[in-house]
Image (cartoon, grey):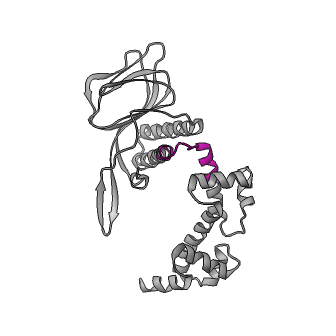
């Protein structure tokens, strides 16, 4: 699954709703769908058909119909389904050299999947509710705001699909730590400082951070500092000034870290950027 390409998705929405089914609600007969459709069930039950398979869905189920799927469905009078639903089309624009390619990347979702992570499910409910309110408001900026919210939902779902150990509770802790590091990268942060901000022990924090991001917290912090250093060097700051501004007291450690991330020294980077003008 190529998550990075799908995160470039440009979606176009055709229907967004917080659906509270009545007793006579159903998908109409002989319906072949021509859009992508995501449904998140948060109450009640329904019996849904996708092509030749029948599913009973309830709270926590994510339902996905792709274009060309045949669908039928009905709810039950004593347990009316309530769900968020969105119909959409999309493309994935990718820049190749100086030209754009528009890729048709399939979504990795099964027809019905249960979201058992309560933290993830709660966050998705909040995002879907915000998405629906934004769409209903009719504001002039509902499309870009809606896309931003939808892409956050999609990113969470792609992360969830990418590993069986996904935990949104861990992701929330890591995101809080990353926000803290981004705000305070120019200070002398330690692992204890960052873990304390999140409210957990350094050893546990280090483990979940690497589980979510693939690198240690200190490596991630160095990455933030080096990216900021590149901006400052491009703006004309000296190597010494840049090192101080991004939280390095030792210029030799700064140069070593910069070369590790960028494959060249800060001075070489300055020479390279000067040649670009």
Q: Position of residue 64 (x, y in %)?
A: 38, 35
> Which stretch appears magenta?
156-174
Q: Residue at x 64, y 73 (%)?
A: 246
Whether residue 111 is visible to the viewer of this picture, yes or no, is yes
Res 251 quadrant in image: bottom right
Farthest front residue in view: 164
Q: Position of residue 95 (x, y in %)?
A: 34, 63
Q: Residue at x 30, y 62 (%)?
A: 100
Q: Is residue 185 magenta?
A: no
Q: Is residue 206 left or right of residue 269?
A: right
Res 257 quadrant in image: bottom right
Q: Residue at x 59, y 66 (%)?
A: 224
Dominant SS type (magenta): helix
Whether residue 242 is visible to the viewer of this picture, yes or no, is no
Residue 120 lies, with reference to residue 184, above or below; the image says above
Res 12 quadrant in image: top left
Residue 58 lies, with reference to residue 199, above or below; the image says above
Q: Position of residue 25 (x, y in %)?
A: 37, 19
Q: Position of residue 137 (x, y in %)?
A: 44, 39
Q: Is residue 163 magenta?
A: yes
Q: Is residue 250 left or right of residue 17?
A: right
């Amino acid at each position: 699954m190529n998550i990075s390409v799908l995160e470039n998705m440009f979606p176009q929405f055709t229907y967004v709703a917080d659906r509270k089914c009545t007793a006579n609600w159903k998908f109409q007969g002989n319906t072949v769908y021509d859009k992508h459709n995501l449904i998140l069930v948060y109450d009640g039950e329904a019996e849904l058909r996708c092509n030749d398979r029948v599913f009973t869905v309830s709270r926590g189920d994510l339902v996905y119909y792709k274009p060309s799927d045949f669908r039928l469905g009905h709810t039950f009078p004593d347990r009316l389904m309530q769900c968020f639903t969105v119909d959409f089309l999309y493309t994935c624009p990718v820049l190749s050299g100086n030209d754009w390619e528009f890729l048709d990347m399939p979504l990795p979702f099964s027809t019905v999947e249960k979201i058992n992570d309560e933290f993830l499910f709660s966050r998705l409910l909040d995002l879907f509710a915000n998405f629906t309110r934004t769409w209903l408001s009719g504001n002039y900026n509902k499309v870009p705001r809606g896309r931003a919210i939808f892409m956050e939902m999609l990113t969470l779902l792609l992360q969830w699909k990418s590993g069986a150990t996904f935990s949104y509770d861990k992701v929330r802790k890591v995101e809080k730590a990353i926000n803290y590091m981004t705000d305070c990268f120019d200070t002398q942060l330690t692992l204890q400082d960052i873990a304390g901000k999140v409210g957990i022990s350094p050893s546990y924090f280090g483990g979940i951070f690497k589980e979510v991001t693939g690198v240690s917290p200190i490596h991630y912090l160095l990455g933030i500092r080096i990216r900021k250093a590149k901006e400052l060097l491009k703006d004309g700051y000296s190597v010494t000034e840049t090192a101080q501004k991004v939280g390095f007291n030792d210029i030799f450690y700064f140069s070593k870290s910069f070369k590790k991330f960028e494959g060249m020294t800060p001075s070489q980077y300055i020479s390279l950027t000067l040649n670009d003008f």
